[in-house]
Image: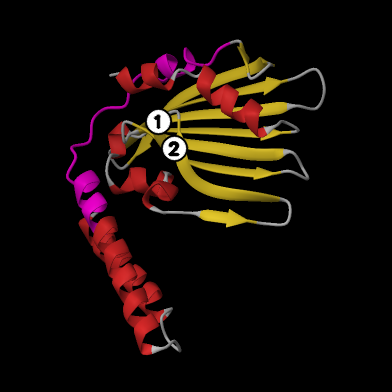
Amino acid sequence: MKTSITLSLVLASALLLGACGGKKAEQEAEKEETAVDALEAFADKAKEIGDRKAVDPIDFRKLKDLMPEKIGGLSRTEATGEKSGAMGFTVSTANAKYKGEGDESLDIEIVDTGGIAGVSTMALAGWSMAEIDKETTTGYEKTTKIEGYKGFEKYDNESKSGELNVLVADRFVVNVQGNNVSIDQLKGALKDLNLAKLSDLK
């Protein structure tokens, strides 16, 4: 894992510093300083997470219990879960599908990465290490705080589809995807999951 961290930092350095070419000297200096700051922050976070000890993921049934029968104004039509692993690494996953009276639908996934803590958690929630703020002609995507947790928000106004992702307690990754729903419905669904209770699960 430490080798992966080092390789990621080297590649990131090459990309960030290479992007400064062709600019004025002052702009290059400013961009290089920004790149160095970003890499230092990435390295600090990577070390912090990488130093954590892996723990056994909780029973996926506890994750399924967090999926209410109704969420965001939609009714649950399916709930599944599993514990899987390979090469000594294990994760617990719970999934639920919700449907409305029309074409509205939500897919919710909760993953406990306890068994592969560290860089693997970063791989599942790479946005948690970035700052994203992007707008398109029909929507946007950005990193933000959702219910007090580091999160990623993406929505398309034309298709009325989007997703919310949050990282809870640096081990639980929660993904909410919706079609034919508003961004408020997505946020309401995430709120109904009771992330504080998820954070307290052992």
Q: Which residues are magenta?
A: 43-68
Q: Residue 64: x, y in percent?
A: 48, 17
> Up-down: is 107 above or below 157?
above
**Quarter location, residue 130:** bottom left
* Residue 81 vs residue 185, the one in the foreground: 185
Residue drawn at the location 70% of the way across and 32% of the way down: 182
Q: How is the image coloured?
A: secondary structure
* Residue 185 vs residue 93, the one in the foreground: 185
Residue drawn at the location 74% of the way across and 38% of the way down: 160
> Up-down: is 137 above or below 110?
below
Q: Is residue 177 left or right of residue 48?
A: right
Q: Residue 90: x, y in percent?
A: 33, 34
Q: Residue 156: x, y in percent?
A: 70, 45
Q: Which mark is residue 148?
A: 1
Q: Residue 101: x, y in percent?
A: 80, 17
- For label 2, the SS is strand
* Residue 91 vs residue 40, the one in the foreground: 40
Residue drawn at the location 59% of the way across and 38% of the way down: 163
Residue drawn at the location 82% of the way across and 22% of the way down: 102
Residue designated by label 2: 145
* Residue 156 vs residue 81, the one in the foreground: 156
Instruction: Check if residue 126 falls in the magenta segment.
Output: no
Disc 2 crowd rating (10 Å Cα; few below 14, some 14-19, many 20+) is: few
> Up-down: is 13 above or below 5?
below
- Contact between labelled residues 1 and 2, with CB atoms less than 8 Å apart: yes
The three-letter amino acid code for the residue at tag 1 is: Gly
- For label 1, the SS is loop
**Quarter location, residue 116:** top left
> Up-down: is 13 above or below 187?
below
